[in-house]
Amino acid sequence: MLEQDIKEVLVTREEIQEAVNRLGEQLTKEYKDKEVVVVGILRGASIFMADIVRAMDVYLEIDFMDVSSYGDAFESSGEVKIIKDLDTHLEGRHVLVVEDIIDTGRTLKYLVDLFKYRKAASVQVCTLLDKPARRVVKDIIPDYVGLEVPDEFVVGYGLDFEQKYRNLPYIGVLKPEIYQ
Ligand code: 5GP
Ligand code: MG
Ligand code: MG
């Protein structure tokens, strides 16, 4: 059913799984001696979050934050509103932010600055997808990247179009008639 709306698969289930395993190994090394609070950004990162924490063999806590960037469906504005804040006190804690995709970089810039302001001991960023062609905030360089994608609007594995398609098990591009 969902499959009919997809023009092209950009990242297969297997490629996602490989990326998760590779990142999980790197993050296990990074955080084996420092307990980390893994912060998933709702709702897009929820599926990736569930997979990546299970690929990390370390002591960790998880928490979620829900933010909305003002803007239209396709581009964030940089003005970020907190819909749900963390329940975890971050002072002195190592923080790993887990995102679905970095596009302009505005959302992450806001979050990284916020967590530093809250006196986190360290703030690192892990994103499943990176769309470097669209970066506006130049000083946002993700520490861990699953895969780079071209400048196309993608859905699946957590990423939505009008709140749908998050449950697709792969990353794809929608047929143009779906947007119309
Ligand atoms: P940024 O602030 O980096 O421009 O955008 C970050 C957020 O915009 C992402 O977390 C994601 O929710 C949304 N976004 C950016 N690019 C895409 C895309 O290609 N597909 C979908 N579904 N969401 C995107
Ligand atoms: Mg997101
Ligand atoms: Mg969205």
Image: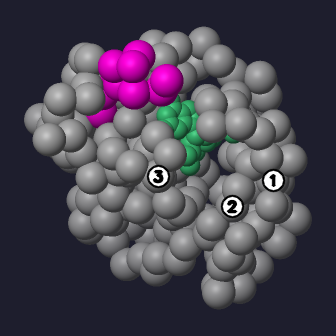
Q: Bounds of the magenta span? A: 171-180
In the rendered image, which residue does mark 2 sit on?
67
Residue mark closest to the camera, 1 vs 3: 3
Give the mark nearer the N terminus: 2 vs 1. Answer: 2
Q: Amino acid at mark 3?
A: Gln
Q: Residue at 50% of width from left, 60% of height from top?
A: 43
Query: Which mark is drawn over residue 163?
Result: 3
In the image, is residue 56 above or below residue 8? Answer: below
Is there CB contact under 8 Å for labels 2 and 1? yes
Is the residue at mark 3 in contact range of ligand 3, meaning its CB lies under 8 Å from it?
yes
Query: Which mark is drawn over residue 109?
Result: none
Residue 29 in sight here = no
Identify which residue, 4 or 29, lies in the foreground: 4
Q: Residue 65's spot in the image, x, y percent?
A: 62, 69
Is the residue at mark 2 in contact range of ligand 2, meaning its CB lies under 8 Å from it?
yes
In the rendered image, which residue does mark 1 sit on?
80
> How far is disc 1 from disc 3 in space, using C-alphas?
19 Å
Secondary structure found at label 2: strand
Q: Residue at 21% of width from left, 40% of height from top?
A: 2
Q: Residue at 25% of width from left, 26% of height from top?
A: 6
Callout 2 crowding tier (Cα within 10 Å): few <14, some 14–19, many ≥20: some
Q: Residue at 46% of width from left, 80% of height from top?
A: 61
Give the mark nearer the N terminus: 1 vs 3. Answer: 1
Among the 4 quarters of the image, the one containing residue 88: bottom right
Q: Residue 148's spot in the image, x, y percent?
A: 42, 22
Callout 3 crowding tier (Cα within 10 Å): few <14, some 14–19, many ≥20: few
Q: Answer with left or right where residue 153 lies relative to residue 169.
A: right
